[in-house]
Amino acid sequence: MRKSLRWLLSLTVLIGTVGTTGAATAAEPATGASGATTAGTSATTDIKDRILAIPGMTLIEEKPYAGYRYFVLNYEQPIDHHRPWAGTFQQRISVLHKDSDRPTVFRTSGYSLSTTPSRSEPTRIIDGNQVSMEYRFFTPSRPQPADWSKLDIWQAASDQHRIFTALKTIYGKKWLSTGASKGGMTATYYERFYPRDMDGVVAYVAPNDVVNNEDSAYDRFFANVGTKECRDRLNAMQREALVRRAPLEEKYKTWAASEGATFNTVGSLDKAYEAVVLDFVWGFWQYYGQDVCDQIPDAATATDDTVYETIDAYSGFSAYTDQGLEGYTPYYYQAATELGSPTIEQPHLKGLSRYGYQPARNFVPREIPMKFKPWVMRDVDDWVRKNANRMLFVYGGNDPWGAEPFHLGKGTRDSYVYYAPGANHGATVAALVEAERTKATARILAWAGVDAQATAAARPLARFDARLDTVDDEQLNREHGLRP
């Protein structure tokens, strides 16, 4: 009896958010152009009050921004969507509110939530609202205690589904999902599990590691990207960092002692040092590109300080310290259990590399159990090839993560895969060649249900705002470490 009562009380916490169709049960008054609502001739209801009327929703803070209302919120989520009565946690989300009569973009980074107002490219294109979600298990959106077995792509997609279901009662127009890098992966997985929620998907630079142990596509990419002169310059610097391992590791050791940096997770300073060096060429192409290749010093004449500082600038010696890894434990856990992670040959380092590309398991504390599930990415890839509908994938022509992209098959409808020539991990629709840019913009507008005249013009509806319209935080933030 006591167990049944606990189950009933837990279920009551959650059931208020979801009605018979999965939607929040609160009634929606008529909406005015400002986002305030009216109920006949009664007083207006502020948009903040409408959002906070959703069961399980609480306000962290509101930040003013001209033309918008911006809210950072907590939303109560089940730890396990299979067993919603078995505990909850607080998940951070944000709402960039323009008008409830406008379409809405659901933006995910796949990582932590930035609490600074910003606008994704699709949000600007459709001039709409934007809802952003912190991925489960990134702090502070982590259940306590953390049962890591509840961190998987289906649980995260179910988080999104509940948020969408709750907010759809307020934002009743069309919805698009978007994200870049791991956020683009997240948007794709959400579509795979809940294909009826969104009216379109715009996934940027989303890698698709279908077979974790087959990474020859990356080897082909690095053998051909940019010019031979640039590739040789980068390879020489990377090789020199391993040739001079002993003196440069002394510098690393001195730095670590001064910063209090430790290496318990990866196992040793030597392993961390090599991991940083092996990321050098990848990091260069992910975040920079051919146009700055001449800034890489000549390895043959460079001093130890120059070699060390160059590797640090593009790879970051803090990346594989315990302190650098801690915030990304959820990513490495997912890479080691479902997403997969790349391995490349780097023949120019033969005889110098002691460990090669280390598996993601090496970057997760040993006390966290994990087992890789090879069928998960195969399932997503197969679903996209056969079922993608109103999905747009955008990649950078010079981004290593685009070497293993999503592909479309015969069963797909109104879906596209485009590459921005010469672009890195910050590729956008705006960077596509003209014909593809026009097509992509028009389809985004059409999916969002804006008027036919605007769709035909195929231009963003909102003016560029230098403060709001930044490249996705996790897409091009130049944080170090081999992560999408």
Image (spheres, helix red, strand yellow):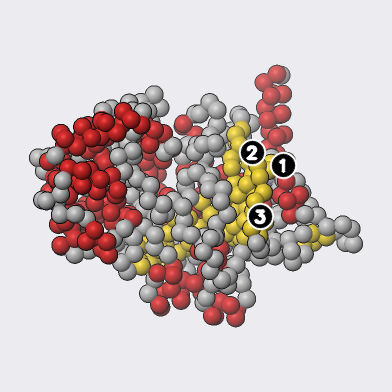
Q: Which residue is mark 3?
A: 64
Disc 1 packing (10 Å; few <14; some 14–19; many ≥20): some
Q: In screen coordinates, is 102 left or right of 39?
A: left
Q: In screen coordinates, is 51 left or right of 117?
A: right
What amino acid type should be assigned to the residue bearing mark 2?
Glu
Identify whether 447 is placed above or below 435: above
Which residue corresponds to the image point at 22% horizontal and 38% vertical from the top-left? 274
Which residue corresponds to the image point at 40% horizontal and 55% vertical from the top-left? 476
Res 184 seen here: no
Mark 1 and mark 2 residues within 8 Å of each other at the beta carbon: yes
Which residue corresponds to the image point at 28% horizontal and 44% vertical from the top-left? 312
The mark nearer the N terminus, 1 or 2, is 1
Q: Nearer the viewer, residue 2 or 66?
A: 66
Real-space Cα distance between discs 1 and 3? 24 Å
The mark nearer the N terminus, 2 or 3, is 3
Image x and y of residue 52, in percent: 73, 46
Which residue corresponds to the image point at 21% horizontal and 43% vertical from the top-left? 305
- Tell me the number on the disc at residue 55: 1
User: Quarter of the image holding residue 73?
Assistant: top right
Q: Secondary structure at mark 2?
A: strand
Q: Which residue is mark 2?
A: 76
The number of discs equals 3
